[in-house]
Image: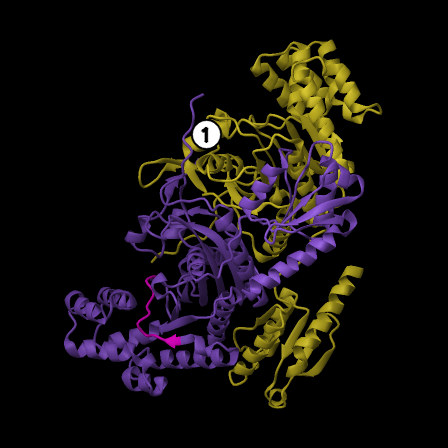
Chain colours: A purple, B yellow
Amino acid sequence: MSRIEARTLKGFRDYLPEAMIPKQSMLDRIARTFERHGFSPVTTPALEYTEVLTGNIGPENQKLLYRFRDHGDRDVALRFDLTVPFARMIAEHGELPRPFRRYQMGTVWRGESPGKGRYREFMQCDVDIVGSESMLAEAEILGVGCAALEGLGVERFQLRLGHRLLLNALMTSLGVDESERVQVILRELDKLLKVGEKSVRQSLRQLAGLEDDALERIFRFIRLGESEGDLLEELESLVGDQPDGPAGIAQLGEILRYAEAAGFRERIEVDLSIARGLDYYTGAVYETFLLDLPDLGSVMSGGRYDGLIGLFLGQSIPAVGISVGIDRLVVGLQELGLVPEQKTSARVLVTTFNIDTASASVEVARALRAAGIPTELYPGTPKIAKQFKYANRLGFPLVVIGGPDELAQGQVTLKDMIGGEQMIVAIADLPGEVEKRLQSLDTASERE
Amino acid sequence: MSRIEARTLKGFRDYLPEAMIPKQSMLDRIARTFERHGFSPVTTPALEYTEVLTGNIGPENQKLLYRFRDHGDRDVALRFDLTVPFARMIAEHGELPRPFRRYQMGTVWRGESPGKGRYREFMQCDVDIVGSESMLAEAEILGVGCAALEGLGVERFQLRLGHRLLLNALMTSLGVDESERVQVILRELDKLLKVGEKSVRQSLRQLAGLEDDALERIFRFIRLGESEGDLLEELESLVGDQPDGPAGIAQLGEILRYAEAAGFRERIEVDLSIARGLDYYTGAVYETFLLDLPDLGSVMSGGRYDGLIGLFLGQSIPAVGISVGIDRLVVGLQELGLVPEQKTSARVLVTTFNIDTASASVEVARALRAAGIPTELYPGTPKIAKQFKYANRLGFPLVVIGGPDELAQGQVTLKDMIGGEQMIVAIADLPGEVEKRLQSLDTASERE
């Protein structure tokens, strides 16, 4: 038989242990935070009817779908996010309670041009609350998002909070009401952090035909969050007389009040230029940046989308959510040195001297595992030097060796691979001794 | 815009919280067991080049692939198991250490006719060791499998252990050496547990043209595990003179010896009829049955597959693994009453009296969460009766209510939804009080 070439598709990748151990640990910690905030796990299928996924996305994004005909000639596609399938799930399962809150961690696929840090397969971690128009829902969502990042050891981050209603009010105050022109303006404003004010002003002039006074008004508006004065009062004077103005101002004020009570007010910077690309947002919108890595882009984004579920249900259902960009976050935290390097889940390697002592090694590994210590039994009996080389390569801090003479006396040798010293330990005492040494290693590494 | 029908594809399903909470908890516990046994997590893409997936599967199984052309006109398909992509990964990443052990939990897709308990999308939890010919690898794999089930609270299960080399030896002892006829015989033997001996004898006669003396020999062979005598000696007399006989006997003996040392010998029943359908197995093979639900089928299966990685590498690399059928296991454990019912991850609902007290409710929820208590804040301010109805529906054991007068005195009411009693608690004391009550509820439910 001819050899098959071992290769992965462009834009796809394997996560080997060195990359997956920290990612899995982060996913676990995020899930625990989501649960502590009362969000329950759900999953939806990776494949959906294409019409389910395309109902609310523009033709540009539709091209990104992995779309095909299945065995039953159905028009199907791989999900490109978790929010649209979630909306479908809510509409399909009328029996679910309201309010309904869930988290979901899952893979999504987009046929984009792969680039640095951009893949065609990546993971999203979403939390959402459905069935509440109250700003308490925003407070819960922003609160769980902040707690998730804090739970990963991230201390320096900033939530940039905008509001679609306030942007609507700004648009009507400028006399702009054609939705196409609004889209152009919002899209250009969204680029502000990336390309800077000068470039945005220029494109707003060229692409949206805005004059100088309109531009002044826009930039005064989106800079309000940085001003010294009372934000809500200034908003009142600027857009309080527009149709969506009062509601937007009231909602923003309420969110900030709850953020104060929940203890994350200082995380928030009001940034009214935030619009979020996706068409389905209707209220508060937010992006999150690591202060030490601003160029990484937003690591956690979301907003209120009161219209999306209605596409399926014919009746509008309020909803608000946030999504943690776990893959980008892994890259960021590694860059910040917040991710310890680890090549194996195990902490101890039990070596095997020869086939006659193999059963004894099996018993030793069993005892260590029974004590909850992550243990690998070397699955073979090559020369001990080879087993040590393996231990070094994977960074095991501790190795157990049992020669025939030692084992006959109920003992083994425990070797500290970092300090280099070794000691003889009775097998019965081994789990306790290993635990003690691992603890002192962990304390030492925390002190570093 | 016309309404989109909210529907899932045939053979696919949503996991709502009631189903996903126990599944997620089982997945977490299995992952912890895998890690305690020194297996590290990896992931591979859901999509692969079709030729990567089809190299070792027959035309029948190829039809089950979700296969299509991607944006770059590549012939791609969704993975149908985790083992073949894993073999591709090993071949592609020559830099990985050997032995190499990993676990992977992931979704796989097969376009089969959906039926009771059979879906087109399901999950697998695999552990494998690559690069070892030693039976210590089998011991590690079988040991981690047993520990995974025990970690889920499953006590009554049985591992049925067969061996491909011994089946080969049986075949040559019968004078059967055409691989097609061997396949027919193995496939029929695999059905033994399901259809019974009489039916298997009949099909062996009709489909493989076996005579009575051959059938006697076969059934004596596959019943050896049940015999009172010394299994290995009897195997010696039956197939010890065949080419693959001595190696198979030695390997089986070694596995059983290590199983004794690792403490799971009594879980194993040698069952030489076990062949496992997949073509890639070359040594020990195993299936696992819940003793109280034998009809559920195998919940954990695997074996040695020394040839698979060679399809990619051109050079043979030994490998052995096991796969936990998590979706089937969830169904089984629910049937056995081993899965507690839970509609939400949270244990306490903090209600909100009105918009003036909302900030105070936010603070109360914050304090409970800071103490590690899974807490939901009701995200809105409808009448308290409605919030109580919601708490009952989701089965919250505890509800916190804070009226304006109470809150003014730094107090809230804590209501026990099971016993019905309620008490006034100072907000500062609330986390401690809630913890105490949750602990006593948990103790009570364990006593049940």
Q: For the N terminus of chain A, which image quadrant? A: top left
**SS at badge 1:** helix
The part of the image, by quadrant, that contains residue B389 is: bottom right
**In the image, what residue occupies the spot 77% across and 52% down?**
A429
Residue at left offset 15%, top offset 75%: A211
Compared to B172, does A404 lie above or below?
Answer: below
Q: Residue at x 24, y 69 (%)?
A: A196
Residue sitting at the far right: B228
Relative to residue B181, is residue B250 drawn left or right?
right
Q: Main secondary structure of the magenta part?
A: loop
For label 1, the residue is B312
Q: Is residue B51 above or below residue A373?
A: above
Q: Position of residue A277 (x, y in %)?
A: 32, 62
What amino acid type is highlighted by mark number 1?
Phe
Residues in magenta, as a range: A269-278
Q: Please rate how many residues cluster around mark 1, counting C-alpha atoms within 10 Å: few if below 14, some from 14 to 19, many from 20.
A: many
In-image side of B55 versus B201 (left or right): left
Q: Position of residue A186 (x, y in %)?
A: 27, 67
- Residue A304 appears in the rendering: no
Check if residue A3 falls in the magenta segment. no
Whether residue B74 can be seen here: yes
